[in-house]
Image (cartoon, rainbow, N blue to C red):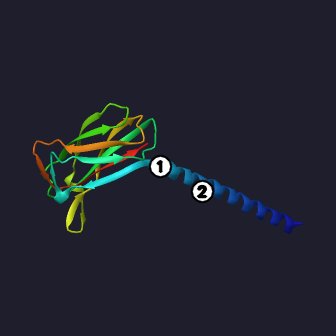
Amino acid sequence: MVKAITSLKVIMLRKTINYILKVLTAGVILLLISCMEHVTYHSCQPITNQIWCNNDTLCFQIDSLASYDNLSLEVELRTLEEYPYKNLSLIVEQVWPKLPQKTDIITLRIDNNQKQYINPIYITESVSQPIYINKASRNGKIKIYHYMKKQVLQGVNDVGIRIKF
């Protein structure tokens, strides 16, 4: 009789531990999913020879964007050690069908103390600034060009966009 009760307690304890582990696993999975960025589009374009003229427009053609009411557009930038300034002003034009063209001027602050050594070059960690897109359609075009006093900028490695919901 004592042995039967002990076996029953062990079985109940194992079931309880399995239940707790399943609940913890489900909780961890839900926590990880909730922390994920919901990126629907991401693209970067290199700057040829790291020289960017003010009339060089970067065009991002978007043809597979999910339709959500509110989207966030982040413009990101990486610079080399040769980039001489602490910020970079950009003009970002958004062209979506059936919506008026939207133009934003943004300034990205560049922290020269956060450069990483990659091969023979130093690249600043990507810095970005969000812009909000309301009721975008599935396709459109984002144009970016720099808005600095100097017409030719040296040391810009690449510019990219990330659209999140």
Q: Secondary structure at mark 1?
A: helix
Question: Looking at this view, is 8 or 113 the one in front?
Answer: 113
Residue kind at label 1, given as amino acid type: Cys
> What is the residue that sits farthest to the right in this orientation?
1
Q: Which residue is mark 2?
A: 25
Look at the image and tell me whether residue 70 can be seen: yes
Q: Quadrant of residue 156?
A: bottom left
Q: Quadrant of residue 124?
A: bottom left
Q: Which residue is mark 1?
A: 35
Question: Left of 101 or right of it: where is 38?
Answer: right
Rendered location of residue 29, percent (x, y): 55, 54
Rendered location of residue 41, percent (x, y): 39, 49
Question: Looking at this view, is 162 or 99 the one in front?
Answer: 99
Q: Quadrant of residue 102?
A: top left
Rendered location of residue 64, percent (x, y): 42, 47
Residue kind at label 2, given as amino acid type: Thr
Which residue appears at 23% of the width and 69% of the height?
119
Label 1 environment density (alpha carbons within 10 Å; few <14, some 14–19, many ≥20): few
- Measure how far apart labels 2 and 1 are at the Cα level: 16 Å
Q: Secondary structure at mark 2?
A: helix
Which residue appears at 19% of the width and 46% of the height?
87
